[in-house]
Image (spheres, rainbow, N blue to C red):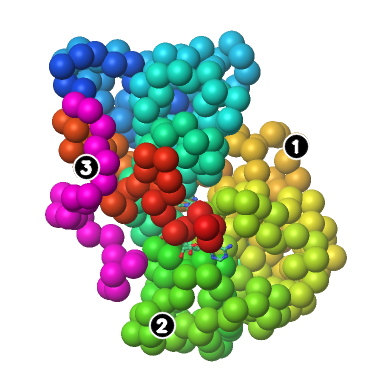
Amino acid sequence: MFSRLATRPLATRPLARTLATPTKQWDRGMKVLAILYRGGEAARQEPRLLGTVENELGLRSWLESQGHEFIVSDSKEGPNSDLHKHITDAEVVITTPFHPGYLTRDLIDKAKNLKVCVTAGVGSDHVDLNAAVERKIQVLEVTGSNVTSVAEHVVMSILLLVRNFVPAHEMIERGDWQVSDVARNAFDLEGKVVGTIGAGRIGYRVLERLMPFDTKEHLYYDYNSLPAEAEKKVRARRVEDLKALVSQCDVVTVNCPLHEGTRNLVNADLLKHFKKGAWLVNTARGAICDKDAVAAALKSGQLSGYAGDVWNVQPAPKDHVWRTMKNALGGGNGMVPHYSGTTLDAQARYAAGTRSILENYLKGKPQEPANIIVGIGKYETKAYGQR
Ligand code: NAD
C-alpha cells in the first residue's frame, strides 16, 4: 500500500511531534456529549453494536471512573433536543455520520466550552469546519476505520446494479419466474470502464477490489494525484476534467468528502455528460448528488441505476424520492440506509479509535496526524477542498 493511502493499525501509527497540544485534562472532570443512533432491541441483543445510544461506544465506565460526565442521546434536532441543550457546556462532542448531529455555525457559537469534536467514523461534513477553524475547535475522526467496509459495499453495489440483482430477487419473492424480464437489463462487469470521483482511501480500495473482474479501464478524478506506482497497481488513469471522466465511464462511483467544492457536484448538467445508461454508486455523501436530478436521470434512462447508502438528510424522510425511484424497467435502485461503514467490524475499530482520541486529549498527548481534520485554528487535511 502507498503512503497517502495506507491505513496502519491504530496502535502502531506514529504520533505527530510538532502539533500544538491541549492542556492536560486528567485533573478535572469535563462534560462529554455523544450523539449516536438508537439501536433498540438489536443493540440490547448485540453488544457489538457499539456505535448506538445503548452501547455508548463502550466509553461510559471508563469516562465516569475518571470523574467525567457522559451524556449520550440520539436527540439532535431542534432547540429542545439534547444536542442543542448540552452543547452549551460540553467540552467534547462525539458525533457519528450515521446519525449526524449537525454542528452548524449557530450551534458552535453557543458551544462556549467546546474544544474537540470527534467523529466516530469517517466524514466530518456534518460539522461546520470553517466555524471550527475560526473558534479553534479541533475536529478529529477515526480515519481509515471503515474504509474497507465501504469499499466492499461499493463493489457489491456496482455488481448488483450491473447484474440487475434487486428486481431478480424481488421477482423470486413475489413467486414469479420470467428470466427474460430481468436478463434484458443484466450485464457483466468484465470489460466495463469504471471511474471514481475521489481516489483516497476508499476510492483506491474500490479500484484494488475491482482488479480481478477484468474491467476494461479504471479512471479517477481527484485534485490529489496518486503516485505513479499506485496508479499502475490498479490500472488507474487520471482524468483532469470531470465531464471528460463521466463521459467515458460505464460505472461512476463517488468517493470524495462533502465540502463546498463537492456539494451538488453530480447535478443535472453533469448527468447529461454521462454515457447513456451508466450506473452511479454513491456511498460518500448524499448531498454530493442532486436528489431530483438523479431520480429524473433514472426515469429517463440517462442512468440505468443508482445505489448507495447516504442521503442528503438522515434519517431520510419516508417520502424521499430515492427510496422508490426506478428506471423504466422497474429496477435500478440499490439504496439502503446508511450502514456500509458501520458493520460490526467497523464499529469495533471506530469505538477503539474514539477512545484513543479521547485518551490522547485527556493526557495532553498529540493526536494521530491522519485523524486531524481541523487542528487548532487550521485545516490539517487536504481532502476537504483545495485551500
Ligand atoms: P480520503 O480523505 O482518504 O479520500 C478522499 C479523497 O477525495 C481525497 O483523495 C481527496 O483529494 C478527494 N477529493 C476531495 N475533494 C474532491 C473533489 N472536489 N473532486 C475529486 N476528489 C476530491 O477519504 P476516504 O476515507 O476515502 O473517505 C471519503 C468519504 O467517504 C468520506 O469523507 C465520507 O464522506 C465517506 N464515507 C462514507 C462512509 C459510509 O458509511 N457510507 C464511511 C466512511 C466514509
Q: Is 84 situated left or right of 348 in this image? A: right
Marks 2, 1: nearer the viewer: 2
Marks 1, 3: nearer the viewer: 3
Q: Are marks 2 and 1 in contact (CB under 8 Å)?
A: no
Q: Which residue is mark 2?
A: 231
The question of residue 55 being in magenta is answered with no
Q: What residue sits 65% from the left and 73% below the top?
A: 242
Q: Secondary structure at mark 2?
A: helix
Which of the image's four quarters has the N terminus? bottom left
Q: Which residue is mark 1?
A: 319
Measure the C-alpha gap from mark 2 to mark 1: 42 Å
Q: Secondary structure at mark 3?
A: loop
Residue 42: quadrant of the picture: top left
Measure the C-alpha gap from mark 1 to mark 3: 45 Å
Which is nearer the N-term, disc 2 or disc 1? 2
Which amino acid, by three-letter code, is at mark 3? Pro
Which is nearer the N-term, disc 1 or disc 3? 1
Q: Which residue is mark 3?
A: 366
Measure the C-alpha gap from mark 3 to mark 2: 33 Å
Badge 3: residue crowd in 10 Å (few <14, some 14–19, many ≥20): some
Q: What residue sits 53% from the left and 70% below the top?
A: 222
Q: What residue sits 70% from the left and 54% below the top?
A: 264
Q: How many marks?
A: 3
Residue 308, image x, y percentages: 58, 55
